[in-house]
């Protein structure tokens, strides 16, 4: 029988009225069956981001971009893709922690909301929504999308696209995120490689307040691991519940 992993012991436990900002990336959804981007078998090892994740790519080859997102949207809707123990632990933290908890996710899946998280910002959007390139209307979208689809706002076709943030576009919710980062007591980064800005710069922003404690929970050291006061490495479904349990044991 395998030995269970030792519990994660936080180096610093915050006061119970502390405000917490959690940044998540593709690594938190890996054990739910969704691919990350930059790992050896990740999405960018099979598809070039220049071909599917820029506004120029959509202008050039909308059918190719739609096919890429239709495939990923269908995958997240399959019955075997469900929130894992890390998503559930964050939802529990939000419901039990006496202070403010904000989850900022770079992920376009809906696993945090399925787990029960409410105070949540999808800074790179969500592919269960479509946006019209012509009039900006945003609508819920669960089926495949194509250039034939007609916008219910302006009644034009050819402009519907996934409501996600591509390279060169401005991430969503940045004012609220910045305000939360500049006033939080604890910043936790989970399952992100720290390669994509502005999210990769959030740890530096949080550290502008001297008292803010910063923690990385990731499978391996991220590109910005040295920026954190505290790091714990291992699978999210193991180290996230363990770390959160230690925080909750304090209240
Ligand atoms: C596990 C695990 C397990 C695995 N348990 N962990 C030069 C310098 C600096 C910046 C730039 C530059 N040139 C251009 C830029 C800007 C650019 C950028 O950052 N480029 C870099 C590549 C250099 N950024 C942008 O363009 C952004 N916009 C912008 O900057 O606007 C300007 C602006 C800024 C501020 C204010 C106002 C304006 C937009 C970026 C959009 C990113 N879009 C994508 C696609 C979204 C839609 C989709 O999903 O298809 O977002 S790209 C992709 O990367 C996706 C992700 O959200 C994002 C981050 O990836 P993530 O989540 O970190 O995944 P991975 O795969 O990289 O890492 C997974 C991690 O998990 C790994 O560490 C694993 O070890 C770990 N792991 N299994 C725990 N079981």
Image (cartoon, helix red, strand yellow):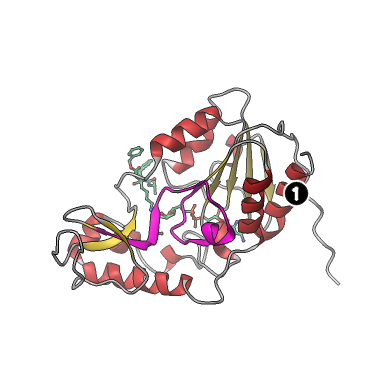
Q: Quadrant of residue 54?
A: bottom left
How many numbered circles does the render carry? Answer: 1
Can I make out residue 105 in this image?
A: yes
Residue in the image at 63% along x and 24% along y = 211
Quarter of the image where one finds residue 231 = top right
Taking 180 as reference, is 87 above or below it?
below
| Numbered disc 1: secondary structure | helix
Q: Is residue 224 positioned above or below 58 on the image?
A: above
Span of residues in magenta: 104-131
Q: In the displayed structure, does residue 13 sit left or right of residue 134?
A: right
Quadrant of the rendering where the N terminus is positioned: bottom right
Residue 219 is left or right of residue 249, and the answer is left
Q: In the image, what residue occupies the spot 35% across and 72% down?
A: 70
Quadrant in which the C terminus is drawn: top right
Q: Is 9 colored magenta in this rendering?
A: no
Residue 193 place in picture, x, y as percent: 52, 50
Residue located 64% across and 35% down the image:
99
Q: Is residue 33 above or below residue 211?
A: below
**Residue placed furthest toward the top:** 210
* Residue 135 horizontal/vertical position (percent): 18, 53
Which residue is nearer to you in this view: 104 or 195?
A: 104
- Residue drawn where x is 46% and y is 74% of the image: 75
Can residue 205 be seen here?
no
- x%, y% of residue 185? 62, 30
Tag 1 residue: 245
Percent x, y of residue 100: 59, 37
Which residue is at the front of the view, 41 or 132? Answer: 132
Q: Residue furthest bottom?
A: 79
């Amino acid at each position: 029988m395998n030995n269970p992993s030792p519990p994660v012991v936080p180096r610093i436990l915050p006061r119970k009225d502390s405000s917490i900002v959690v940044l998540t990336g593709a690594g938190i959804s890996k054990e739910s069956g969704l691919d990350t981007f930059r790992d050896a078998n990740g999405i960018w090892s099979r598809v070039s981001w220049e071909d599917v994740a820029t506004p120029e790519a959509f202008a050039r080859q909308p059918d190719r971009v739609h096919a890429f997102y239709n495939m990923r949207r269908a995958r997240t809707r399959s019955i075997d893709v469900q929130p894992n123990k890390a998503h559930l632990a964050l939802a529990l933290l939000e419901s039990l922690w006496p202070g403010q908890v904000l989850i900022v996710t770079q992920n376009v899946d809906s696993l945090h909301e399925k787990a029960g998280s409410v105070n949540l910002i999808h800074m790179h959007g969500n592919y269960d929504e479509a946006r019209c390139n012509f009039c900006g209307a945003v609508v819920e979208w669960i089926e495949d999308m194509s250039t034939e689809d007609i916008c219910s706002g302006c009644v034009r076709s050819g402009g519907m696209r996934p409501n996600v943030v591509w390279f060169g576009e401005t991430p969503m919710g940045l004012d609220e995120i910045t305000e939360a980062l500049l006033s939080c007591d604890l910043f936790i980064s989970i399952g992100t490689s720290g390669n994509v800005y502005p999210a990769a710069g959030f740890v530096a922003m949080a550290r502008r307040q001297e008292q803010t404690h910063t923690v990385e929970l990731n499978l391996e050291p991220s590109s910005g691991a040295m920026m954190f006061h505290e790091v714990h490495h291992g699978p999210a479904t193991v180290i996230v519940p363990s770390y959160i349990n230690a925080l909750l044991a304090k209240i």
